[in-house]
Amino acid sequence: MKFKLLLAFSFWMLLMAVSCNKDDINFDQPSQLLSFSRDTVFCDTVYHQVRSETYAVKVYNNEDRDVLIPRINLEKGAGSLYKINVDGKSGYDFKDVPLRKKDSLYIFVEIAPEATGPEAIAEDRVIFTSPAGEQHVTLFSVVQDAEFFIQTPSNPNIIENHTTWTNNKAKIIYGDLTVDSNITLDIQAGTKVYFHKNSGMKISSGASLNINGALDNEVILRGDRNDADHDTLPKNWNSIKLEAGSTLNMNHARLFGGTKGLEMKQTIANISNSFIHTFQEYGIYAVNSTVNAKNLVMNNCGESCIGIFRGGNHTYTHATIANYSKVMGSFTRNGIFATNEWKNENGQTEQGALQQLNVLNSIIYSDKDNSIAFEQTPGQQFNFLLQNCLIKYSNTSEAGFQFDINPSSVVQCYKNEDPQFINYFTAKLNLRVKSASFARGKGNTTIAGTVPTDIVNVSRTTNPTLGAYQ
């Protein structure tokens, strides 16, 4: 018995001795330079007094011994717009930071700045000081002043007077923002409108939304996550919902990253020189509406770039309607879908006449077998004209129309010739066509004369190229 107690006591003493030796570490000052996972932290655009995402930098000790970094600090000290967390502790100046041999530690960075104007640069450096030399990691961010529109139980978030938004501040929308009946909201060139998750805008009956961008100074409407990953993802916000009797005029705008883009019911919309892309369902979702669009670029929509329900009256001239996606590769991804039917909010099917759908001097293409799908209800009016268009087309049963033997509705069109887009994926979206593209010179000159300049103001009155770009 005594022997067993002595053995147990000896075991615990040995264990304690080993533990003590393990923790008895001698730290030296670095004799070599540290290394970092990156030398610059580019924080995404942040808004006035809104805390950013957290960014991480790893610091590596490449020496074969444990070191004590004498000092890690923000160059601008307590006055910095940035905050850092070193080895689990928050602050701006740290002394004698331990780092085990062949190991690393995380430094976390965030910014919650005060804006000093419409747009400014926030820059600082994390300084590492040791006998081996001074090193730094640069911190960089664009800061925007912002105006917030926040829906709460006590604030329905309604614009009740004629209003003009300018580009002096970004507009950040939480929840739904409603433009009241018979009210006009004008959005001027260069304005940036950001929607928080599950947020959107509603244009009430009789109201007007005028988006007045300009070449090289477009209006941006998107989700409020500015990190690069979210630039190419859908469903970051809901939609711009236009109720019956409302009006949309949109020029030089870029709308992307939501569930539906323009959600219209018995709406009149005039769209020009604009980009609509990366929506989970539809870029344009139109129920018994009138849409006139020219120089329109669309891509990367799960169900269809354009969805036409319960008929209506539509004209798309010199449009580039592509639908390619890495994120939504398994979705239907039509370029244009049109039907006489629509299921209302009560699940009842309503019918409507497609008075006219004109697609002129355009490209409707994707990596699917068909880029157009028509579903006509027998006996319902369904008038369409595809003229001087390049179309991805496989068969009548899926497309819903006959390509080769319908001379009154399919005029001087081309099928299955690769348009040769420069880059059709949204990370580097460029739907210009290459110099050898089949689409060059295939446009109808008379039609081009109705839209004499392309989306970047290049003349197309001679040898017009199909699509939005000359």
Image (cartoon, rainbow, N blue to C red):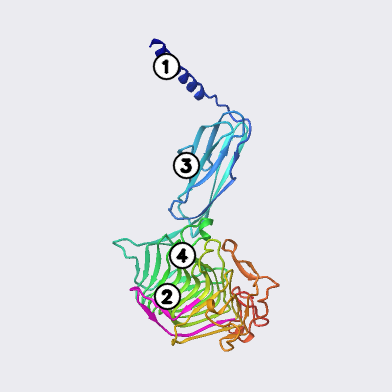
Q: Do the residues bearing badges 4 and 2 touch, measured as CB atoms within 8 Å?
A: no
Q: Position of 401 compared to 8: left or right?
A: right
Residue 88 lies, with reference to residue 263, above or below; the image says above
* Residue at mark 1: 8
Which mark's residue is nearer the viewer, 1 or 2?
A: 1
Q: Give the range drawn in magenta.
A: 337-360
Q: Do the residues bearing badges 2 and 3 touch, measured as CB atoms within 8 Å?
A: no
Can you name the residue that lies furthest to the bottom here? 408
Which mark's residue is nearer the viewer, 1 or 4?
A: 1
Magenta stretch mostly in which secondary structure?
strand
Q: Earlier in the sequence, mark 4 or mark 2?
A: 4
* Numbered circle sitting on residue 258: 4
* Residue at mark 2: 264
* Residue at mark 3: 78
- Quadrant for residue 133, please give it: top right
Q: Which of marks 3 and 1 is nearer the N terminus?
A: 1
Name the amino acid, label 2. Answer: Met
Q: Where is residue 369 in the image (x, y as percent from the top left)?
A: 58, 72
Please count the marks in the image: 4
Per the model, the C-alpha gap separating discs 4 and 3 is 39 Å
- Quadrant for residue 362, please give it: bottom right
Q: What element carries label 2?
A: strand
Asked if residue 353 is among those painted magenta in the image, a careful observer would answer yes
Name the amino acid, label 3. Answer: Ala
